[in-house]
Image: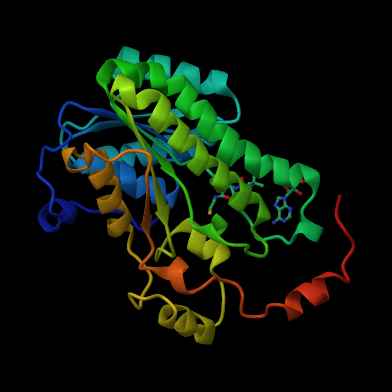
Amino acid sequence: MPNTLSQDYKRTCVWKDDLFAGKVVFVTGGAGSICRVQTEAMVLLGADAVIVGRNGDKAAAAAREVAELRPGAKVLSFAVDVRDINTILEAVKQTVESLGRIDYVIAGAAGNFLAPITGLSANAFKTVIDIDLNGSFNTAKATLPELLKTKGSVVFVSATLHYRGLPFQAHPAAAKAGVDSLMKTIAVEFGPLGIRSNALAPGPIEGTEGMSRLGKGSEHNRQRSYEMIPLGRYGTTQEIADGTVYLFSPAAHYVTGQVLVVDGGQWQTTSPRMDAYPSVMLELAKQPNKI
Ligand code: COA
């Protein structure tokens, strides 16, 4: 069970209760932890939602749970693999048939694991590029015609991995660099048509799938990691929700082509997983090169 938002969010957040009333948000990766809280915040503040994911059962379960957050909320789910644009186009068609419109898109479907380049086959690299980068393009391509009708807005889920060289993350870092670039092109091509395009780049967020998969380490390393974050702690899912709400809200109506980094300033001071650098690279050089 991801670290989800509760109805307390409405009491504690700074946003108006009905900020997104009558609007519809379409979310890829909405069953995962980051996109799940983004969706929850939008629904708590009045939006209806569509959660699409590769695992249809997981997406359906997430949709049922998110719908319970607000009486009257409609939250649909569809089984979609973002690598196949036809599955997204079908979900968009059914969304419009059922909910009438799409105002906001969160392109968040992603895959990741830790691997050095020697342990990363060509297919492994391609798989992550296909999900993270090509999947983001497919999502935008399939939803932009609907956003044109509503003068809507898209938020890509990015990262800070590619702001410098980072070992074991060649694949998602290359993908997210592409996502940031795609986001900016959409801002420029579609801005004149009334569409805004931005990205949100989470840093280390407590209780997320990413942290549990990628952030394993000793208590000593964790303490060291806190010390290297200017704000002295990992972020919360609520802080990701707030960043997302901001980017979709009227408060950001003059903001497009931007990456909002929500990381407590982490990337400015440190690069995660560099503790054993460079000795770990010298050790890995002895391993066979996986093709
Ligand atoms: N290290 C090295 N290579 C790996 C790997 C790892 N930990 N996990 C998968 N791969 C490789 C596979 O070996 C395969 O390459 P090969 O054909 O040369 O052997 C390639 O990646 C594709 O793996 P596969 O399992 O067939 O792909 P998939 O489409 O089922 O899964 C992944 C996609 C690999 C991204 C998988 O990790 C995933 O589904 N993740 C979803 C959840 C997630 O990552 N969330 C993000 C949290 S930050």
**Residue nearer the viewer, 196 or 273:** 196
Image color mode: rainbow
Residue 208: quarter of image:
bottom left
**Residue nearer the viewer, 160 or 214:** 160
Q: Is residue 254 among what the camera can see?
A: yes
Left or right, 237 with respect to 81, comes to left
Q: Residue at x 80, y 49 (%)?
A: 121
Left or right, 199 with respect to 248, comes to right
Report x, y in % for residue 287.
87, 67
Left or right, 112 with respect to 192, comes to right
Q: Residue at x 55, y 82 (%)?
A: 218
Report x, y in % for residue 229.
40, 75
Q: Is residue 75 among what the camera can see?
A: no
Residue 273: quarter of image:
bottom right
Q: Quadrant of the N terminus?
A: bottom left
Note whether 231 is above or below 208 in the view shown: below
Q: Residue at x 73, y 62 (%)?
A: 116
Left or right, 23 with respect to 222, comes to left
Report x, y in % for residue 112.
60, 52
Residue 251: quarter of image:
top left
Note whether 184 is above or below 100 in the view shown: below
Q: Residue at x 57, y 64 (%)?
A: 214
Total numbered labels placed on residues in the image: 0
